[in-house]
Image: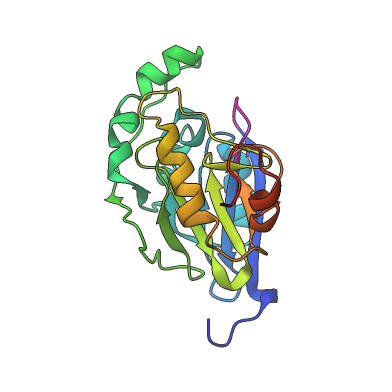
């Protein structure tokens, strides 16, 4: 990122919505552009941070399409006019938002159509973000790496001391283990992992201490 420094990089991650999903706003303070990842609720809080920093939202990204990561997506899109992106393998979950809300006893929301589908190793056009396809929790689960700033947004694939559940529609235990071992554990040990719920961790810590998936 020529001409940029760590002082230009903005990151705020905070729990939102009924299931306290970690929503992340990652931006470039110099260019006044940002990405919103997993807006799972509390749209007013998300929009307040965007407006306070005078950001233009380049894209609204989703690590996957479980309801707790997408509940505020429609409102954020309406207010920012930013495009919505998801991996195509989770399109069925996006379209099942009504059933998902009913399953968890949450008032139903209406979601717009996805504007585009994220692919593995795709550059997302802001803050040098690169998408990594990490299926297992869902077929279309994605992680987002900001390598220069040593940050990985892992959604519900990898947690501090744990991994994402695989007993929901589309989940696959063998796939999530493979994703973690082959794709995430091959990354820099010093990467800070922003998880889908709960505290952050580091790749190196999980490789040695995670009881579910340890480095081979």
Q: Is residue 74 visible?
A: no
Q: Is residue 215 visible?
A: yes
Q: Residue furthest front?
A: 216
Q: Is residue 18 magenta?
A: yes
Left or right: 210, with 129 as reference point: right
Q: Is residue 103 magenta?
A: no
The answer to whether residue 29 is above or below residue 145 is below
Say which of 117 and 82 sits in front.
117
The answer to whether residue 153 is above or below residue 22 is below
Q: Residue at x 57, y 87 (%)?
A: 3
Residue 180 in percent (x, y) is at 50, 48
The answer to whether residue 96 is above or below residue 45 is above
Tell me where residue 4 sits by quadrant: bottom right
How did the renderer colour the structure?
Answer: rainbow
Tell me where residue 170 sits by quadrant: top left
Magenta extent: 17-22
Left or right: 34, with 10 as reference point: left
Residue 208 in percent (x, y) is at 69, 51
Q: Main secondary structure of the magenta part?
A: loop
Residue 82 in percent (x, y) is at 39, 53
Say which of 95 and 165 sits in front.
165
Left or right: 197, with 182 as reference point: right
């Amino acid at each position: 990122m020529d001409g940029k420094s760590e002082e230009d990089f903005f990151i705020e991650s905070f729990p939102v919505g009924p299931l306290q999903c970690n929503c992340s706003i990652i931006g470039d303070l110099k260019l006044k552009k940002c990405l919103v990842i997993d807006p799972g609720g509390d749209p007013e809080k998300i929009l307040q941070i965007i407006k306070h920093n005078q950001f233009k939202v380049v894209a609204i990204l989703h690590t996957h399409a479980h309801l707790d990561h997408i509940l505020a997506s429609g409102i954020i899109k309406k207010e920012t006019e930013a495009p919505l992106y998801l991996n195509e393998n989770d399109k069925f979950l996006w379209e099942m938002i009504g059933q998902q809300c009913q399953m968890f006893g949450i008032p139903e929301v209406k979601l717009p159509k996805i504007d585009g589908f994220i692919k593995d190793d795709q550059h997302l056009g802001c803050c040098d973000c690169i998408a990594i396809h990490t299926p297992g929790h869902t077929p279309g689960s994605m992680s987002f790496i900001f390598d220069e700033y040593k940050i990985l947004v892992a959604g519900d694939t990898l947690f501090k001391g744990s991994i994402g559940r695989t007993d929901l529609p589309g989940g696959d235990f063998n796939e999530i283990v493979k994703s973690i071992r082959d794709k995430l554990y091959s990354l820099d040990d010093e990467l800070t992992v922003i998880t889908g719920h709960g505290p952050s961790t580091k790749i190196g810590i999980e490789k040695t201490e995670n009881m579910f998936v340890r480095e081979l």
